[in-house]
Every structure is written in C-alpha cells, then in structure tokens.
Amino acid sequence: MDANSTTAHKRVNPLPTAPLVAPPAQAHPLAIPVPEVVELGAPITTLERIYRTEGGSGATLRMARTAATDFKREFTATGTPAHVSTHDLITLPYPTKFGLWRAPASPSPFLFITNRLVIVRWADTDGRRRTLLWEPSDTELDGNTPYFATLQARTPKPLLGMMVHFKATVLERLSEVGIDAAEVDYVAFDHLHTQDVRHLIGTTKPQADISPNAPVPAWLPNAKLVVQRTELEAMRDLHPLQRPWYQPETYVDLAPERILPIDGDRLLAPGVAIIRTPGHATGNQTLVLNTDTGVWALSENMIATECLTPEHSKIPGVKGWARSWGQEVILNANVLETTAAQYNSCVVEKTLVDRSQRDSRFLQFFPTSELTARPMVSPGTSPTFVHGSLRHGA
C-alpha cells in the first residue's frame, strides 16, 4: 500500500473513535434469578478432562485437542438433527481491534459483522418435535448495551443508518419458515453480551422502558433460556471489565421457571450439543451440530472461519501476525477475561469441526456474528471466505 492510499483510507472513519464513557459500576449484586441446574439432555463427560488437567497451561491445551478428538468421534455417532437453518438479523459495525484482536493492519477502526439466527429442530425419543433458537437477538433492545448505546449517541443518525442494516426480527424469520412462536422450546446464546431477553421469554413485573403498565408478554410463550450457570452468577456482580457489554438489570424480573441453567456440556439430541467454551465470556458456550456435510461449531469466539486457519487468510496483517507470534487462532477478544482459556476453547472448536466442502482450506466453524465485507467504509477487513448460510435437512 502506497502513502497516498494509506492517507485516503485513514479518512474513512465510519463511526467516532473517541473513548467511550464508562458505564456506572454496579453498587451491589443484582437479584438475578439463578435456578437450580437442570439435567437437560445427556451429560457429555469426555470434555471434562480439559478442566481437570493438572500441570501448566500447555498441558491443558494438549488435553483440549485430545478430548475434542475423542468427543468428535462420539458425537458423530449420535446422528443428525432434522433441520438446521440460518437467518440474517442485522449487520453492524464492531471495533476492528476486538474482532481481529492484535492482528489486523487495517486503518479502519470498525469492521462489520452479520448476526444470524440459527433454527435447529429434532424429534425426541417419544416423537415430540423440539425447536431451539440459537442467537435469537432482539436487535432493538440489544442496542441499549452500554458500549453500543454510547457509540450510537455519538454517531449522527444519517451515518448510523448507513452503518447499521436491520434485516428482520426473530418473529419475522420464524414466520418466513412457517414456525409458530409457540413451537419454540429453547432459546440460547453463545454468551449474554448485549442480550436483552425480556421480549423473548417475558417478565414477571412491568418494565419502565418497554411495558410500564404490565409484565412484558413473551414473544415465545413456551420457550426457556438455556444458559451456563456460571454466566448467570457472573452477571449478578459484574467486574468493570465486563460491565460495558452486559445489560444485567434486564434479567432481574425474569421468571425463574423460564430459565434452564446448565453446568458444562450437554447432548441435547442426535447431532445437537451445547458445550462450554469459556474465555470470551465467563459462561461462553458453543453450539455443535452434526449435519450432512459433517460437524459444525457455532459461536462468537472468532468472527471468521479463517481465524482458525490464519495461514490462509488474505486479511492484511492476519497471516503475518499469527506466524510471527506462533499462534494458530485469531481471537474475538473485547473483554479478555481469560485469554488463554479462550484460546484453548478455540482449539477445541477447531479440532471438532470438519473442513468446508466449498474450500478445504477453511473449516466448518460458523461465527454467529460473521465478518462481512464493506470495503468502501472498512478497507482491509474483507473476509477471505464466508459461509453466509447453513442449511441441513428438511
């Protein structure tokens, strides 16, 4: 890149880059309901070895590879779900220094990611059909997250309208595929950064901002939130490093019976598992699916599948940074709660998944918020390869 092009790129700042105002610290723990842990599906014991390994961090990383290899063999033998599909909800800016951590060479302060709803369906042993929504984000209320709320307040509305592209709501996507909202059994997220779930599962009391006169009615009247117990407990009393990314006050009036805390790794159905992948957030978890093309992992630990094989990335800076530092994955790291643990979690995902049938250099890791090319406003951040969508079954 010559000097002139560098200067031109530096003028392309899609959103203000001034430091954000820190959200107020929590004065005391919040009374967020944390019900008893449930035995949802079947426990997965194979991966427990990762968290019981004695010795140094290197030993834990080696065990992560071994345990993930063993689990993949077991998991593929369980079968496949009846249906998997992805559906775009919103494309929005995200800080480049978080999404690609220390690797990018782009002068753009923001890259773009597309958040997608994932619909998974299967039949229980008694023949009852089950429906899981993965990442059913309420794109309107999620914007109240302290980090993004401050960013929006500092951005002129015409510019914000150019940067943020709303595609559809969760209810609109369900309607498009012919699923009644009452059919949804479970909702889950890889972690609860930004998420406000009050519309999804309702509240027990009126909410001043969205329903001042009555409890919030649930969009999904029979759905329950599947979440790692550790994340619910962490939200009760957040550290200042965590606070900009959560809306913990919105969880206080959730009905305890609408929450299903799990503790660790669970096989929900043939070819459907939720496994813990801590690091990006305390209670981070990954959806693992077995499909016609093999095993997929879906999370926000990375924003592009090439972040698992950076040696094949054409994003400026990524390949060189990974080679120079001897690191095999590029983290999505906005909090850095436990960076080494997140690295190990990414290696678990990398070990579990199969290679893409479209391009074998890349893996069937599908970021729930996937890097999206916007070269005119975010030069040097276009992905080398995107999945775009995932379809399996009827």
Image (tube, rainbow, N blue to C red):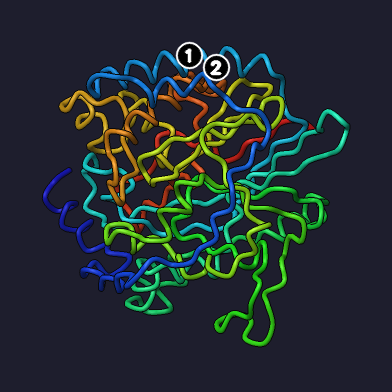
**What type is the residue that disc 2 sits on?**
Lys
Element carrying mark 2:
helix
- Where residue 81 appears, as percent x and y from the top left, is 73, 29
- Depicted 87 relative to depicted 221: above or below: above
Q: Which mark is residue 180?
A: none
Answer whether labels 1 and 2 touch (C-beta < 8 Å): yes
Looking at the image, residue 267 lies above or below residue 237:
above
Looking at the picture, does residue 24 appear above or below residue 46?
below
Q: Residue at x 67, y 14 (%)?
A: 77
Q: Residue at x 45, y 33 (%)?
A: 385
Where residue 269 sits: x, y (%)? 71, 29
The span from disc 1 to disc 2 (Cα, nearest Å) is: 5 Å
Task: Identify the residue at image location x=64%, y=24%.
Answer: 290
Q: Which residue is farthest front? A: 36
- Name the residue type under label 1: Thr
Relative depth, front residue between 34 and 378? 34
Q: Residues within 10 Å of mark 1 (few under 14, many from 20)?
A: some
Quadrant holding the N terminus = top left
Specify the quadrant of the image occupied by residue 124.
top right
Q: In x, y percent, where is residue 287?
A: 56, 36
Q: Quadrant of the C terminus?
A: top right
Q: Secondary structure at mark 1?
A: helix
Front residue of 2 and 228: 228
Q: Quadrant of residue 105?
A: top left
Q: Residue 72: which disc?
A: 2
**Depth check, front residue: 293 or 53:** 53
**Residue bearing the label numbered 1:** 69
User: Where in the figure is residue 347, as x and y percent of width and height?
Assistant: 38, 25
Q: Is residue 247 left or right of residue 85?
A: left
